[in-house]
Each structure stands twice: as C-alpha cells, then as structure tokens.
Image (spheres, rainbow, N blue to C red):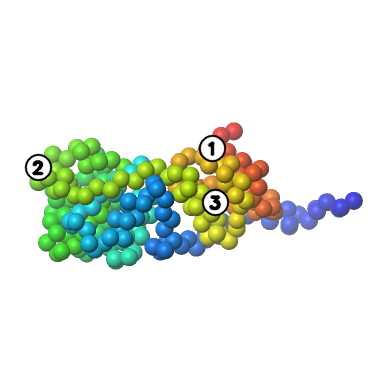
C-alpha cells in the first residue's frame, strides 16, 4: 500500500501557493481576434489612415476595450489618460491620446473640447473608450456634441465563446500551465461573459491546482468558478 505523505513542509507548500508575477504578452501579435472584436482590431490596424482625428470605442464592461486601446497606444506611442483626469490644467503631452472610460458625470466638457482641439491642431489622433455612446454622457456643450457626433464609432460585442476560449488558453500559457479543452468547454456556458472573468478564473484555477499539487481538472475548475462568482 502506498504510504501517505505526511511531511508538514510539503503539505504547507501545497496549501500556500505563492502569487508570483505573471508575464502577460500584450503586443499586437498577441491580440486575439474573433467576431466580437474584429471591427475594433481592424480599426487600430488601419491607423494612421483613420477617417478623422477622433475614434470612439464603445462596448460593455469586460469586452476588451482597454486592452485594444493599450495595444494601439503601445503601437503608436500614445499617451493614456483616464477621462476623469481630463482637466483644463492637465493638458496632454502628446498629439496621440487614449482617453479611457468616458461616461456621464465624469467628463469635464470644456477641458475635453480643448483637448480634442489640441489633438486636431497637432495633426494627431485620439481614441476614446466608453461603456456607452456619447449621447448618454449628458454633454450639453454644442461644439463638443458636434465633435463627438462627427467621430467614427466602433462597437465591441460581449466576448463570444471563441474569444473567451482563446483568451483562457493564452492566459494559461502566460502562466506556463494548460488545461484540457474539455475543462474550458465546461466553463464557457457557466462563466460571466467578460475578459475580466476569464482572467480571474485562470488565476484561481492555477492557484487551486498548485494548492492541491495537481493538474487543472474539472474539479479544480468548479472550485475556481465558485470562488470567482462568490457562490457557496
């Protein structure tokens, strides 16, 4: 009969996995494309041949707006600023700019208008990300309303199965681990439809597998799903 392992050091190691840094690939070549984000990826690939100086990238939480915007920013060297940081005394330092998470109640209209004028005057480009269309931001400044209406808008859909599956495989590879395709297929109809959920699930599956000293199995995935979703 196989003797059970009782070394307390080995048991403690299995139960307390270390949260080591994970090297995540974020170059353009690592951007996964599916029907849910194809138009947005084609948009950043088309730069600098955009139809105008301003582009809007709109999509639900977890659809990958920030990732796509960061890939574009890295490609062209654009400055990234949260929308709430666009203020009259915080002018951008570049004519290439990403403005993240514009929404109702956080946009300083006069400052945003002057920022867009700066980008335009310097022959640059600006990419604004948001969960909603500009008509829902409560903008009343006529010139800014006109500028936003003239911008080309690209809409992201919630991640589809193809994108979620490919993203989880990539995230697992970033951690130098893998999971059977059957495990990922089991997770897809049960998980939240967002890339953030995919990231959390992969991290938790890795953590649970390390704690148990096993590979990632459906049992490990089930526990990870329960922890990530807050279930019992």
Helix, strand or loop for disc 3: helix
Count residues near mark 2 (Cα–Cα under 10 Å), then give few for <14, some for 14-19, many for 20+: few
Count residues near mark 1 (Cα–Cα under 10 Å), then give few for <14, some for 14-19, many for 20+: few
Pointer 1 residue: 190
Which mark, by number, is residue 181?
none
Identify the residue at image location x=47%, y=61%. Answer: 24
Would residue 195 be visible to someone looking at this image? yes
Identify the residue at image location x=9%, y=42%. Answer: 142
Helix, strand or loop for disc 2: helix
Mark 3 vs mark 2, CA separation in Å = 46 Å
Would residue 89 be visible to someone looking at this image? no
Identify the residue at image location x=42%, y=63%. Answer: 29
Q: Is residue 198 above or below residue 123?
A: above
Count residues near mark 3 (Cα–Cα under 10 Å), then give few for <14, some for 14-19, many for 20+: some
Pointer 3 residue: 203
Nearer the N terminus, badge 2 or badge 1? 2
* 206 relative to 44 in the view: left or right: right
- Where residue 231 appears, as percent x and y from the top left, is 56, 34
Mark 2 vs mark 1, CA separation in Å = 45 Å
- Where residue 41 appears, as percent x and y from the top left, is 34, 55
Whether pointer 3 and pointer 2 mark residues with C-beta atoms closer than 8 Å, the reply is no
Identify the residue at image location x=39%, y=46%. Answer: 36
Nearer the N terminus, badge 3 or badge 1? 1
Pointer 2 residue: 142
The residue lying furthest to the top in this view is 232
Mark 3 vs mark 1, CA separation in Å = 17 Å
Nearer to us in this view, 60 or 212: 60
- Where residue 92 appears, as percent x and y from the top left, is 21, 60
The residue lying furthest to the front in this view is 35
The residue lying furthest to the left in this view is 142
Image quarter in which the C terminus is found: top right
The residue lying furthest to the right in this view is 1
């Amino acid at each position: 009969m196989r003797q059970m392992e009782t070394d307390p050091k080995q048991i403690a190691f299995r139960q307390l996995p270390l949260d080591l840094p994970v090297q995540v690939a974020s170059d353009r070549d690592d951007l996964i494309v599916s029907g849910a984000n194809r138009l947005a990826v084609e948009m950043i690939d088309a730069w600098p041949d955009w139809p105008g100086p301003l582009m809007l990238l709109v999509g639900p939480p977890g659809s990958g707006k920030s990732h796509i915007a960061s890939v574009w920013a890295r490609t062209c060297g654009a400055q990234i600023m949260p929308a709430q940081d666009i203020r009259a005394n915080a002018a951008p330092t570049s004519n290439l700019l990403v403005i993240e998470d514009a929404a109702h109640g956080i946009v300083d209209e006069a400052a945003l208008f002057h920022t867009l004028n700066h980008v335009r005057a310097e022959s640059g480009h600006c990419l604004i990300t948001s969960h909603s269309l500009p008509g829902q931001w409560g903008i009343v400044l006529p010139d800014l309303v006109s500028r936003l209406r003239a911008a080309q808008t690209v809409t992201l859909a919630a991640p589809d199965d193809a994108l979620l599956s490919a993203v989880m495989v990539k995230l697992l590879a970033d951690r130098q681990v893998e999971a059977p395709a059957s495990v990922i297929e089991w997770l897809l109809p049960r998980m939240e439809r967002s890339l953030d959920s995919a990231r959390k699930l992969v991290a938790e599956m890795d953590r649970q597998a390390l704690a148990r000293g096993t590979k990632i199995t459906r049992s490990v995935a089930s526990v990870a799903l329960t922890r990530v979703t807050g279930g019992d």
